[in-house]
Image (cartoon, rainbow, N blue to C red):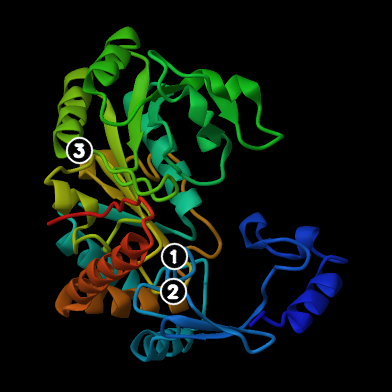
């Protein structure tokens, strides 16, 4: 039975007169007659304007780790609203949430808040450059680190098997090609290529930016030995290891991918699972690096550490830390893979899955 998208289609016709593509983010545009507008979300389901109900396996690209409209988090957010919003001043809860993050992630000795994953990674790269006095950085092919010029590069899939630094192109117009010269791209899980890159550019590289489980690239994961080698090479060459946990943080383990792999970052970023969909992100790391913030390195933002988002983060992180939520999520994922595999196998369709293991 075909879906009826009459109301969503009509909304698109109205919206496109005032919004490019009729949406607030390029990634929400699915086509003129297929773009969906949501009426509400509850738990693992969303309902569109035409009352079609969808099971949302991606949960907004990951933020709603506890499901849409979780009553506990929303109640906390309402309490946060009573604080009054933002003041160009700090509130007590900033310390409370930072302390919880430090408890869950040992490498997060000090914490600063931002509003999005992109902002957190931008700040992390700036801080790494300031701390080392260098400009260049290493980035893995296929990794996604947000929508800013330094990170918006890709390698054509057919070029991935090439030896040496691959051909890299910007994945948006408007990105200065000169920015490309600061970035050095390596293939995941090739320790020899990584070491060669460190050696050839010794004294120039400020940080290695890595997403150990590539959320936008089929979930390709770094091998544990590779990440440990990266950690050792960063130490050897005086490079900051910046682990991007915008997607994996507080999700694949309470301490994120760093706990999963047993490797500590120098700097790390978090966002999606922090507050169950309320806008907040985190830059955290070693005290000696983080202390440069405000002492030479600029960081801030009008809406940073908003009282509503902080209150939601406090409750969401408490649930993830103190309940069996993550164990249940992992169980759901395992059962889902088994069910999908049974369906595909029954039809003779070759398939494979990726996923983290404890």
The answer to whether residue 320 is seen in the rendering is: yes
Say few, some or many: other residues with alpha carbon within 10 Å of mark 2 (under 14 / 14 to 19 / 20 or more): many
Closest to the camera, between mark 1 and mark 3, is: 3
Decide if residue 191 is on the left or right side of residue 112: left
| Residue found at x 54% / y 29% | 156
| Residue found at x 23% / y 56% | 256
Q: Secondary structure at mark 2?
A: helix
* Quadrant in which residue 297 is drawn: top left
Residue 207 at x, y percent in the picture: 34, 29
- Residue at which label 3 appears: 223
Do the numbered discs 2 and 3 sit on residues whose CB atoms are within 8 Å? no
For the C terminus, which image quadrant? bottom left
Query: 239 or 63: nearer the eye?
Result: 63
Q: Secondary structure at mark 1?
A: loop
Earlier sequence position, callout 2 versus callout 3: 3
Say few, some or many: other residues with alpha carbon within 10 Å of mark 3 (under 14 / 14 to 19 / 20 or more): some
Do the numbered discs 1 and 2 sit on residues whose CB atoms are within 8 Å? yes
Decide if residue 229 is on the left or right side of residue 120: left
Residue 280, label in figure: 1
Query: Label 2 to label 3, Cα distance in Å?
Result: 34 Å
Earlier sequence position, callout 1 versus callout 3: 3
Say few, some or many: other residues with alpha carbon within 10 Å of mark 1 (under 14 / 14 to 19 / 20 or more): many
Residue that lies at the very extreme toward the right in this rendered image: 17
- Residue at which label 2 appears: 309
């Amino acid at each position: 039975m075909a879906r009826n998208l009459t109301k969503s289609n009509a909304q698109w016709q109205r919206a496109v007169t005032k919004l490019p593509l009729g949406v607030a983010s390029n990634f929400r545009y699915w086509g003129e007659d297929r773009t969906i507008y949501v009426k509400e979300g509850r738990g693992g389901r969303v309902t569109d304007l035409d009352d079609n109900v969808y099971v949302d396996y991606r949960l907004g690209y990951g933020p709603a780790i506890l499901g849409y409209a979780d009553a506990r988090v929303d109640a906390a957010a309402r309490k946060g609203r009573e604080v009054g919003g933002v003041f160009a001043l700090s509130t007590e809860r900033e310390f409370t949430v930072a302390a919880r993050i430090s408890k869950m992630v040992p490498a997060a000795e000090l914490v600063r808040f931002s509003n999005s994953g992109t902002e957190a990674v931008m700040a992390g790269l700036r801080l790494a450059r300031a701390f080392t006095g260098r400009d260049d950085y290493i980035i893995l092919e296929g990794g996604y680190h947000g929508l800013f010029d330094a990170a918006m590069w890709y390698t054509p899939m057919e070029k991935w098997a090439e030896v040496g630094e691959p051909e890299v192109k910007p994945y948006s117009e408007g990105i200065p090609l000169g920015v490309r010269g600061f970035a050095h791209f390596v293939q995941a899980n090739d320790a020899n290529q990584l070491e060669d890159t460190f050696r050839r550019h010794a004294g120039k590289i400020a940080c290695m930016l890595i997403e150990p489980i590539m959320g936008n690239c089929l979930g390709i994961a770094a091998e544990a030995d590779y990440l440990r080698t990266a950690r050792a090479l960063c130490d050897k060459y005086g490079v900051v290891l910046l682990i991007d946990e915008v997607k994996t943080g507080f999700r694949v383990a309470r301490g994120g991918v760093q706990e999963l792999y047993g490797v500590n970052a120098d700097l790390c970023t978090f966002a999606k699972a922090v507050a169950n969909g309320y806008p907040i992100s985190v830059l955290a790391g070693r005290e000696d690096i983080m202390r440069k913030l405000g002492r030479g390195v600029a960081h801030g933002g009008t809406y940073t550490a908003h009282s509503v988002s902080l209150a939601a983060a406090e409750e969401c992180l408490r649930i993830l830390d103190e309940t069996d939520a993550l164990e249940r999520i992992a169980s759901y994922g395992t059962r889902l893979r088994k069910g999908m595999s049974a369906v595909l196998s029954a039809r003779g369709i070759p398939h494979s899955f990726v996923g983290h293991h404890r």
